[in-house]
Image: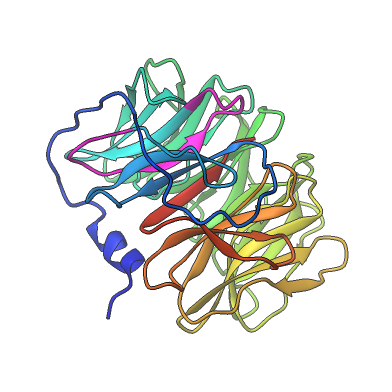
């Protein structure tokens, strides 16, 4: 039997009817709150609870849930702006488009057409621009666009795909991956596209770059030692080192807010778990161990908890747990994906 996340992935790219964005409708909470602890920030997520993928938000304890979009198309992949005033998201018409709206769902506007549905995109640290992948001439290139709208600026233009753009914390540089030298490697460029240079060089694919909060180090994924592991490298390409050493395949490194730990999605056969690794001593903690899927971890603003997606209850729902893996509980009822916690 296919799991919900497998079905959803199979639907990406299927045309649906035209988009009609409306103002948000408040919904009654359907979550079982994991604790009475007051949490800062709000969580944005996509949910299929009403028969179509829409964007919702909720407080950190699962309360005060709001549906922000109401359309006959898919709205997914929400991203909070740095000041939590706006949410960027992907929506599917004939092609995937990049949109932005206020945090209450008002003032929706389109920023770009033809983005990669699951391609990485991110707000600049100052909240004025977004970086994203867009398909041009059959290849993916990296663009930025003003958050208020305007013409996108193309930063890369090669005969092969450029993917996975991510801003440095100071907003001056962008890390990304490219196939331009024959296999996937990690590159860094200035925020305007200048001075593009490769910082990894291995026959295996190096991808999924993620900047440390202090901007000195980039975590990335590589299979250079036989299976997918998380590696670290200085932003200038020096001091590459392997962080994880486990038979499991480790994907999607996600730094804790203080930069001391990295959460990742770890795969053992068909089993997906969430693990956290200490950057200082490589100590590894397996936070989930269920049959099925546990993934998409996102840190709370203070780094004490993780929100994540799990189908342990039969459908994919948004869960919360302490950063040591204790006290897991349903935060948002099924079916939910793509959590992002405001800072």
Residue lying farthest to the right in this orientation: 281
User: Is residue 102 shown above or below 286?
Assistant: above
Q: Residue at x 46, y 73 (%)?
A: 312
Q: Residue at x 61, y 51 (%)?
A: 209
**What colouring method underlies this structural image?**
rainbow
| Magenta span includes 266 | no
Lateral position of residue 327 relative to residue 29, left or right: right
Residue 172 image position (x, y, % from top left): 67, 27
Residue lying farthest to the left in this orientation: 17
User: If the image is split into quadrants, where does the N terminus sit?
Assistant: bottom left
Judged by its main secondary structure, the magenta piece is loop
Lateral position of residue 274 relative to residue 313, left or right: right
Residue 285 image position (x, y, % from top left): 74, 72
Residue 73 image position (x, y, % from top left): 20, 41
Indicate the quadrant where residue 135 lies: top left
Magenta segment, which residues? 69-86
Residue 154 image position (x, y, % from top left): 43, 28
Indicate the quadrant where residue 74 lies: top left
| Magenta span includes 75 | yes
Q: Nearer the viewer, residue 154 or 167?
A: 167
Residue 196 shows up from this direction: no
Q: How many marks?
A: 0
User: If the image is split into quadrants, where does the C terminus sit?
Assistant: top right
Q: Residue at x 71, y 58 (%)?
A: 262
Residue 31 shows up from this direction: yes
Indicate the quadrant where residue 112 lies: top left
């Amino acid at each position: 039997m296919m799991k919900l996340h497998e079905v959803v992935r199979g639907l990406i790219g299927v045309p649906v009817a035209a988009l009609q964005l409306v103002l948000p409708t408040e919904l009654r909470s359907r979550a079982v709150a994991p604790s009475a602890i007051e949490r800062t920030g709000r969580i944005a997520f996509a949910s299929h609870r009403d028969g179509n993928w829409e964007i919702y938000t909720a407080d950190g304890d699962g309360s005060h849930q709001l549906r922000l979009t109401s359309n006959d198309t898919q709205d997914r992949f929400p991203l909070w702006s740095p000041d939590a005033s706006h949410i960027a998201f992907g929506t599917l018409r004939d092609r995937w488009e990049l949109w932005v709206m206020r945090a209450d769902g008002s003032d929706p506007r389109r920023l770009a057409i033809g983005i990669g549905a699951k391609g990485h995109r991110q707000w600049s640290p100052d909240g004025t621009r977004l970086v994203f992948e867009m398909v041009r001439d059959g290849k993916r290139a990296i663009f930025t666009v003003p958050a208020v709208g305007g013409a996108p600026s193309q930063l890369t233009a090669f005969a092969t795909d450029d993917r996975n753009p991510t801003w440095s914390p100071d907003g001056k540089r962008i890390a990304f991956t490219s196939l331009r030298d024959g296999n996937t490697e990690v590159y860094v460029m200035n925020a305007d596209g200048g001075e593009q240079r490769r910082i990894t060089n291995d026959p295996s694919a190096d991808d999924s770059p993620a900047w440390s909060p202090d901007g000195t180090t980039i975590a990335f994924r590589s299979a250079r030692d036989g299976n997918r592991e998380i590696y670290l490298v200085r932003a200038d390409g020096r001091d590459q080192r392997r962080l994880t050493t486990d038979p499991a395949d480790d994907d999607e490194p996600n730094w804790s807010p203080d930069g001391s730990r990295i959460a990742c999605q770890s795969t053992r056969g068909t089993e997906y778990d969430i693990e956290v690794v200490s950057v200082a001593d490589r100590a590894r903690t397996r936070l989930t161990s269920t049959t099925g899927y546990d993934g998409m971890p996102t840190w709370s603003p203070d780094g004490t908890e993780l929100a994540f997606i799990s189908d342990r209850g039969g459908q994919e729902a948004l869960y919360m747990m302490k950063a040591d893996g204790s006290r897991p509980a349903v935060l948002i009822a099924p079916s939910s994906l793509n959590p992002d916690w405001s800072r």
